[in-house]
Image (cartoon, rainbow, N blue to C red):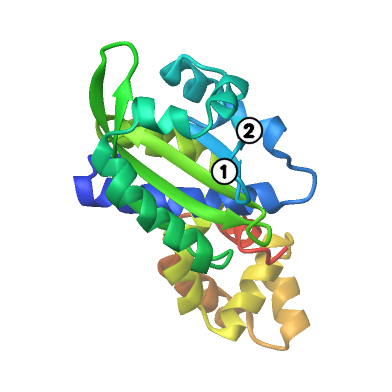
Amino acid sequence: MGYKTDKENLATQMQNLYLLDKLFRKEGCSFKEIVDDIPGIFHTNYVADMSIDNMNREGEEYSQLTKEEINEMGFEYFLEYAHPYTIEVVGPRFQKFYEEADDEKVKADFQLIKNPKTNEYDTFFTVSKPFKDKELLLTTSNPVETLDWISTKVERIAGEEIFVRKHFRQFQSLTIRELEILTLIAQGKTNRRISDQLFISIATVKQHRKFIKKKTDCKNTVELVKFAQAFDLI
């Protein structure tokens, strides 16, 4: 992976939370199963009272508190650890977002959070979005200097979803006929069988295959199959 600019890292954090949201929505995937695999600080909160439902180990390690201890402290936690600017300015921005946003919206902002190990404020980039009709909020919040590393780790977790994001434009560039042929290729059909099934010449099939590879940046059939699987063609 190449070096990302600060702007790219911030944008990636917002995209990654959206992709994690999609991952959680998949059947059979629960927060408890994956929460500790998510890099950086991640937690879910109930919209009604902002109490924490899930928090990963990194979140508890940074705060040096369990989610139960944070919930018991309530608003005192923010008074203790959040900078006054974060409480007075950034907090209301998020609150307004929570009241107005639907499940597809993502909110991001900078916060100053006191590091209990150093007693100094760290600059965090916090991203949040509603989940399941706003009953819960998904939030990632991490020191800005760790964002590049976290982006790399999330890409490994989200896997196929990240692939879809990176190749969506190529996918959109394919014609209906090319999508049809790509599907048949991914199903293991030979050029001859594709030719017979679609009533076109083998030379035409080969030409389509050439164009599909060029448009998708796929070098061989294995990569074409991966591409087709990622976009649910098979």
> How packed is label 1: few (under 14 Cα within 10 Å), some, or many (20 or more)?
some
Figure quadrant of the C terminus? bottom right
> Callout 2: helix, strand or loop?
strand
Which numbered disc covers residue 50?
1
Figure quadrant of the N terminus? top left
**Residue that appears at 39% across and 33% down:** 150
**Residue that appears at 39% across and 39% down:** 151
> In the image, residue 97 lies at what x, y percent?
45, 62
> How packed is label 2: few (under 14 Cα within 10 Å), some, or many (20 or more)?
some
Q: Which residue lies furthest to the top in this view?
A: 117
User: Is 64 in front, or is 205?
Assistant: 64
> In the image, residue 8 lies at what x, y percent?
26, 51
Badge 2 amino acid: Asn
Using the rendered view, name the quadrant where residue 79 is placed: top left
How much space separates mark 1 and mark 2, taking CA atoms?
12 Å
Which numbered disc covers residue 175?
none
Q: Residue furthest left?
A: 5
**Residue that appears at 60% across and 84% down:** 177
**Residue that appears at 59% across and 51% down:** 21
Count of all numbered marks drawn on residues in the image: 2
Indicate whether 133 appears above or below 194: above
| Residue assigned mark 2 | 54
User: Is 143 in front, or is 190?
Assistant: 143
> Callout 1: helix, strand or loop?
loop
- Please report contact status of discs 1 and 2: CB closer than 8 Å, yes or no: no
> In the image, residue 154 lies at what x, y percent?
47, 38
Examine the rendering and report whether any part of residue 220 can be seen: no
In this rendering, would 106 be left or right of 232?
left
> In the image, residue 181 lies at what x, y percent?
64, 75
